[in-house]
Image (spheres, rainbow, N blue to C red):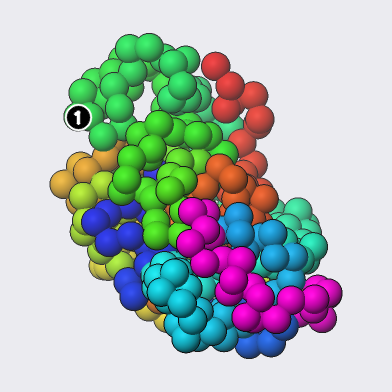
Amino acid sequence: MGRRGRDNPLNGGNARGFVFCAASGAGWGHPESGAKMTLTLAQIADRLAGAPDLYAALREVGQTHPIADLIATLEKGTPDQSATADRLASVDRGLLHAVMRKGAGLPPVPAEPAIRAHLARVTPAPMFLPAIGDSPTLALLTEGQHPDMPAFSDPAFDAWFAARGVRYGLGTYGERRRVYETPQFADAASPERRSVHLGIDVFAPAGTPVHAALPGRVRHVTYNADPLDYGHTLILEHDAGHLPFYTLCGHLGASLPNLLKVGDTVAAGQLIAHLGDWHENGGWAPHLHLQIMTDMLDQHGGNFFGVGHPSLLDVWTAILIDPNLILRIPADRFQV
């Protein structure tokens, strides 16, 4: 599942997760040399003022500037510009910067290609035993493929899934889910809902052991307590040839803080968690939400986005790359 809860995770004042500028590049503080500097900050402020979709407006600028400088320019301008500054200031600045980079013809995350290449070279350990690819599975698609399937947040799902007679259920990366098309999943920059799932879900009974796919170091052990949030959450930092990248495991059980502490070294194949039950995993049917982050943006508290805007998929899929680069589940297992 994705990042949820009453506090909008795109709000810079409620930033969650952590940031490593080595992954996001130096562009936060300086205009990018790859962009044609044809507009001044004042001209960009004029274009942005009152725009309904600030992400689209930033993309159309076609160049990058430090987000802090742009907000400061807007704050000094007209009432419309000042209101626009407030909207931008409420959004994750790393995401805004990635959108501007994409609009300027630059990779949203400079390290993304190298991280993908690294993952193609390694051999991850199975996160579940028996391995998912060696076991009966069912693709749990949500667009009517299973008309009688209860919602993942409906306790009736447990009995429905148990009756299917498979060991694992699979929720797909890149699926648009209507459950997220509510005001809870919008932000001040745009009316568009973040409705595209950017992790892979693995459903199995509560208490199922979860193992590390890759070696790494524990960055966060967190309990994200908001309803329909991640519950017990683990974020690991990994090394791709001196480039950091991160994995998030959400909806875990209360055994997590007894198994791992911040700073611990984790070996591939090591037991790291158990799947959480409803009361401890954010209020969902027991499952693992796994995602890979190429950059932690401006998130600082042990959480991260798990769903993205459809119009920004070319940006979001550079920030949150396909977890099947680690899980290695045959593609046909995600089909009904």
Q: Which corner quadrant holds the C terminus?
A: top right
Above or below, 314 against 27 in this view is: above
State which quadrant residue 10 falls in: bottom left
> Which residue is the site of mark 1?
155
Magenta region: which residues? 32-54
Above or below, 274 against 151 in this view is: below
Residue at 52 percent of width and 54 percent of height: 53
Residue at 65 percent of width and 31 percent of height: 330
Above or below, 252 against 177 in this view is: below
State which quadrant residue 43 falls in: bottom right
Judge from the rendering whether residue 274 lies leftward or rightward of residue 321; answer left or right. left
Q: Amino acid at mark 1?
A: Pro
Residue at 61 percent of width and 66 percent of height: 47
Q: Main secondary structure of the magenta part?
A: loop
Residue 252 in view, yes or no: no
Q: Which corner quadrant holds the N terminus?
A: top left
Judge from the rendering whether residue 155 lies leftward or rightward of residue 132; answer left or right. left
Above or below, 77 against 158 in this view is: below
